[in-house]
């Protein structure tokens, strides 16, 4: 009798070890997932490391980031300024906003008036003190000369008369509205508004865009992350909602608000799209019957799910926030990533499967060449996800063993003849010519398609964009561009005169497209055309820091001219920026001028993405082809895979031209994205996988992309629909290349281990 107790104990120990290892790995994955953060800040849509982006970051460090814009509207003109109590409440609201966490500065009409009144009161106090000091100085000198006391007092009174005669007229001229206080409506109206109409003075029109509206700008601190941005936006909305003012409408918008909306949408869609992808892909593998063992049919989905979760966990443990691409990452990896566990579960042609997985990783990984962070992160996440999914599939097969093949399909004479592929002659030539022509036209279209890289368009579908559009219509602009002027002293008469002249040229030449918001020259306009250095120094000294800090650094080595521009067309904005540089002209010696802002960085991103589109596509295809050539030691396999990808990429480009008419940063790398499926289908059709398995994989990949069509974000919907077509194109191209264009003789096919299956097997 054979004693098998030792084998049983060993098997049990191995099972317990595997179970404990799986539990430990699961705990690590879950803890990593809890650390995952989504970053949808505008920085993730802009070219990282580019000098333009660095200049934008430096400007944010000195003057704050792009503002949260609060628009308060009333039914009556100047209602908030005619009522002193309402104005005091407005000042209180601005103070409350300034005290929110992560706020660098708040600029609003209430605080401008309050600070101006305070500065005027300080000046009056200084004049009053100077008046008394002058009288005492005259009397002291008289006593030193031995003048009698009664004469000393007369000289003192005479000195006061002379002082009042000299400065009294200036005070009356400077304060025609009476005492500088918020409770004096005439003072308020004089400071903010023109005398002849209801319009605000030019330097304050960015705060009072119309007689019935006011704007409050809340600038966040530089480098604020997604969580901080959401917290700031929620705080602003809460403060505005609770303010005790009679308002007809309130609007909270701006780049941080759109970024916060993207983050909220990403958090909301991530679990939903992931769950839908798991369910849809799982049902495909469950009912297609790719193996006769029913309980093993969900292996590919389970392996892809573990690989996906492990990838997200890696980002969490690394402390690397995931950008908007993570929402697209889940359905893609669950759909396409499950293909490789499907092949590996059979236990055949492992080398071909692993080499194909490597080719897919290289195809996706080539997205790292994109200058935009959210596109790079998507490519890296997909490459890592495929690696971890393949590792999971191998571990599952090692523990549970391979699965059996599906039950053979029964054919009868009533089924009719099998599908016959063209083997040679005219039919084969027609198919080959059609592939060459359509692929060529597609690649020509790919190089000429417009690229949409504007952050607002990438967020299309968010309700926050409706508020942004409304504010744009009211304010006359949607973006902010700053001329950052650097010099030893930007308030020197020479630099100030040049900046005033440059601003005048901008208004004269580009006034229909550019609207000045605020500058150092605007704040010092009251000094006249040619102020002296002493006059400028004195004016800056008495000017409230609240006002000067908006455009002037404390050391006076840097100042900004803030301009409002239209942000509807990034391509047109590039031309505007060129015209702006020409209008500014050449600065004086020792003066540097940088044009910075979110629109500038977006235009730069569009330029970089458009210039590198072909390189990214060719890099992914070339790397994948080289991996197949080296890994399988087969030039023929590599040639077939590359040809499949080239043809399918051309077809998808034609599809994009016929539907959307443009590409976005996600779809611009069509070749890299199609490389994964094109190489997979091409290689697996020749090495070890029957048509049913490859068709199942194609269906799963198509489903993964189609899940993205459920997203409310237009950029993800377009991406999903277009690349779902890409999977179908890859499958059809792989079949045509393998069965028609480069069809081998049966003897050669037998040597290459290519199953001679017919297309009709898909239906079985």
Image (spheres, grey):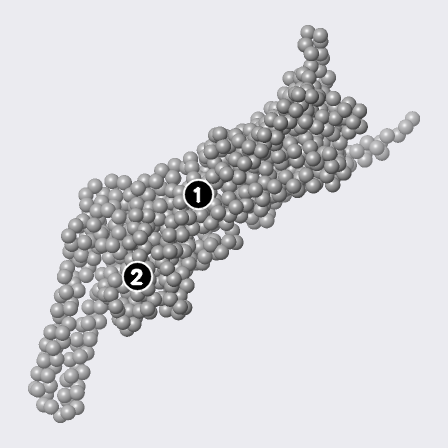
Furthest-front residue in this view: 426
Q: Quadrant of residue 4?
A: top right
Q: Residue at x 63, y 20 (%)?
A: 287
Q: Are marks 2 and 1 in contact (CB under 8 Å)?
A: no
Furthest-bottom residue in this view: 146
Position of 325 with respect to 65 (left or right) is right
Q: Which residue is mark 2?
A: 501
Is 728 or 642 nearer to us in this picture? 642
Q: Earlier in the sequence, mark 2 or mark 1?
A: 1
Q: Which residue is mark 1?
A: 454
Tell me, yes or no, if residue 388 can be seen here.
Answer: no
Q: Quadrant of residue 348?
A: top right
Is 496 or 390 nearer to us in this picture? 496
Quarter of the figure that contains the N terminus: top right
Where is 635 relative to 759, above or below? below
Look at the numbered disc 1 and give the secondary structure of its residue.
Answer: loop
Is 214 or 571 nearer to us in this picture? 571
Q: Residue at x 25, y 50 (%)?
A: 208
| Tag nearer the camera, 2 or 1 | 2
Look at the numbered disc 2 and give the secondary structure of its residue.
Answer: helix
Marks 2/1: CA–CA distance: 32 Å
Where is 671 relative to 554, above or below? above
Place of residue 741 in the rendered image (x, y in percent of width and height, measured from the top left): 68, 27
């Amino acid at each position: 009798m054979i004693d098998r107790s030792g084998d049983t104990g060993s098997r049990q120990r191995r099972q317990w070890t595997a179970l404990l290892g799986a539990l430990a790995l699961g705990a690590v994955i879950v803890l990593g997932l809890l650390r995952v953060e989504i970053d949808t800040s505008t920085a993730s849509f802009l070219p990282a490391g580019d000098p333009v982006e660095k200049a934008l970051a430096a400007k944010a460090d000195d003057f704050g980031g792009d503002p949260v814009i609060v628009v308060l509207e009333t039914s009556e003109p100047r209602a908030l300024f005619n009522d002193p109590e309402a104005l005091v409440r407005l000042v209180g609201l601005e103070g409350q906003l300034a005290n929110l966490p992560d706020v660098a500065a708040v600029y609003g009409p209430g605080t401008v008036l309050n600070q101006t009144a305070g500065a005027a009161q300080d000046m009056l106090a200084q004049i009053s003190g100077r008046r008394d000091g002058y009288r005492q100085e005259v009397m002291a000198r008289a006593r030193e000369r031995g003048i009698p006391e009664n004469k000393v007092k007369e000289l003192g009174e005479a000195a006061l008369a002379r002082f009042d005669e000299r400065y009294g007229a200036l005070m009356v001229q400077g304060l025609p509205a009476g005492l500088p206080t918020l409770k004096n409506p005439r003072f308020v109206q004089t400071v903010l508004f023109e005398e002849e109409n209801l319009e605000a003075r030019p330097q304050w029109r960015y705060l009072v865009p119309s007689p019935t509206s006011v704007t409050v700008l809340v600038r966040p601190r530089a480098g604020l992350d997604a969580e901080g941005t959401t917290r700031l936006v929620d705080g602003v909305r809460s403060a505005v909602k609770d303010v005790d003012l009679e308002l007809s409408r309130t609007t909270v918008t701006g780049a941080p608000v759109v970024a916060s909306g993207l983050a909220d949408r990403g958090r909301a869609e991530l679990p939903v799209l992931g769950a839908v992808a798991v369910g849809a892909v799982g049902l495909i593998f469950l009912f297609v019957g790719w193996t006769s063992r029913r309980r093993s049919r969900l292996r590919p989905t389970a392996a892809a799910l573990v690989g996906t979760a492990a990838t997200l966990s890696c980002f969490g443990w690394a402390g690397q926030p995931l950008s908007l691409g993570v929402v697209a990452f889940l359905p893609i990896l669950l759909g396409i990533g499950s293909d490789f566990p499907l092949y590996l579960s059979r236990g055949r042609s492992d080398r071909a499967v692993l080499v194909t997985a490597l080719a897919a990783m290289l195809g996706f990984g080539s997205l790292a060449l994109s200058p935009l962070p959210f596109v790079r992160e998507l490519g890296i996440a997909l490459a890592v996800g495929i690696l971890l999914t393949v590792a999971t599939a191998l571990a599952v097969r090692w523990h549970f063993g391979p699965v059996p093949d599906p039950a053979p399909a029964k054919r009868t004479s009533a089924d009719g003849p099998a599908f016959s592929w063209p083997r040679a002659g005219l039919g084969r030539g027609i198919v080959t010519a059609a592939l060459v022509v359509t692929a060529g036209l597609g690649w020509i279209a790919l190089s000429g398609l417009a690229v949409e890289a504007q952050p607002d368009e990438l967020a299309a579908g968010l309700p926050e964009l409706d508020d942004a559009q409304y504010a744009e219509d009211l304010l006359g602009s949607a973006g902010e561009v700053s001329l950052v002027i650097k010099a030893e002293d930007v308030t020197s008469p020479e630099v100030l005169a040049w900046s005033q002249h440059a601003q005048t040229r901008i208004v004269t030449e580009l006034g229909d497209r550019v609207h000045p918001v605020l500058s150092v020259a605007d704040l010092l306009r009251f000094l006249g055309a040619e102020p002296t250095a002493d006059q400028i120094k004195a004016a800056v000294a008495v000017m409230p820091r609240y006002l000067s800090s908006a455009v002037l650094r404390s050391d006076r080595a840097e100042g900004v001219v803030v301009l409002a521009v239209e942000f509807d067309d990034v391509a047109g904005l590039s031309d505007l920026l060129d015209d702006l540089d020409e209008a500014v002209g050449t600065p004086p010696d020792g003066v540097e001028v940088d044009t910075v802002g979110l629109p500038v960085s977006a235009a730069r991103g569009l330029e970089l993405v458009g210039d590198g589109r072909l390189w990214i596509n060719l890099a992914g295809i070339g790397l994948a082809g080289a991996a197949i050539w080296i890994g399988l030691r087969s030039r023929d396999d590599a040639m077939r895979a590359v040809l499949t990808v080239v043809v399918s990429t051309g077809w998808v480009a034609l599809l994009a031209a016929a539907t959307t008419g443009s590409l976005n940063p996600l779809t611009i790398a069509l070749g890299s994205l199609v490389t994964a499926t094109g190489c997979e289908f091409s290689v697996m059709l020749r090495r070890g996988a029957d048509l049913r398995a490859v068709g199942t994989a194609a269906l799963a990949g198509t489903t993964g992309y189609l899940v993205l069509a459920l997203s409310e974000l237009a950029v993800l919907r377009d991406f999903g629909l277009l690349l779902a077509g890409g999977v179908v194109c890859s499958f059809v191209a792989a079949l045509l290349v393998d069965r028609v264009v480069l069809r081998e003789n049966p003897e050669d096919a037998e040597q290459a281990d290519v199953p001679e299956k017919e297309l009709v097997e898909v239906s079985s």
